[in-house]
Image (cartoon, rainbow, N blue to C red):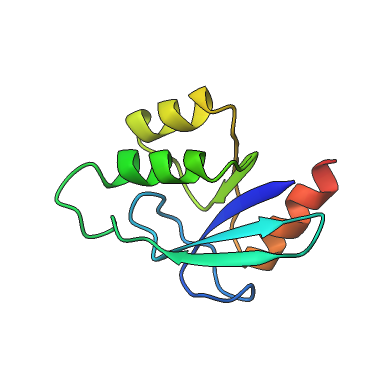
Amino acid sequence: MKICITSQERILEAEIDPRFGRCRYFIFYDTETGEKEVVENTWREAVQGAGVQAAQFVASKGVQVLVTGGKLGPKAERIISLANIKIIEVQGKVIDGINQVKNLR
C-alpha cells in the first residue's frame, strides 16, 4: 500500500507535521516494498491555495492513505476524499504513522 505522511524533515524518525498544505515535506512510503520518496512541499509558501495544490499533488501520486498531524482544510479534504484516500491523524514520528497504517490491515 502506498501512503503519504506529512513531515517536518526528510527522515522517517522526523516528527509528523501537523499542517497538511503547509507541511515541509511529503514522505511517500510503500508498505509492501519499504521504498520511500521524499518530496519538498513547494506550495507551503503559497499566498493561498496551498492545501488544494498539495491535495491535488498527493492524489496524483496514487496513495491510498494520508497520514498527517492535524485537520485538512475543507477544500483539500474534499479533493483527498474524492480520490478515495483515507485520512489518518497521528501525533509522533513518521515511522509511528507508517506502523499505525501497517497495523490497520
Residue 99 left/right relative to 71 = right
Residue 35 left/right relative to 85 = right
Quick one: quadrant of the C terminus? top right
- In the picture, residue 93 is in which quadrant? bottom right
Residue at (64% x, 42% y) in the render: 65
- In the picture, residue 42 is in which quadrant? bottom left
Q: x and y percent of residue 90 in the render? A: 61, 52
Q: x and y percent of residue 35 in the render? A: 71, 65
Residue 22 left/right relative to 62 = left
Residue at (77% x, 64% y) in the render: 34
Residue 19 left/right relative to 87 = left
Residue at (80% x, 60% y) in the render: 33
Name the outermost residue toward the left: 47
Q: How many marks?
A: 0
Residue at (43% x, 29% y) in the render: 79
Q: Can you say whether 80 is above or below 43 in the image?
A: above
Task: Please tell me which residue lies in front, 101 or 54.
Answer: 54
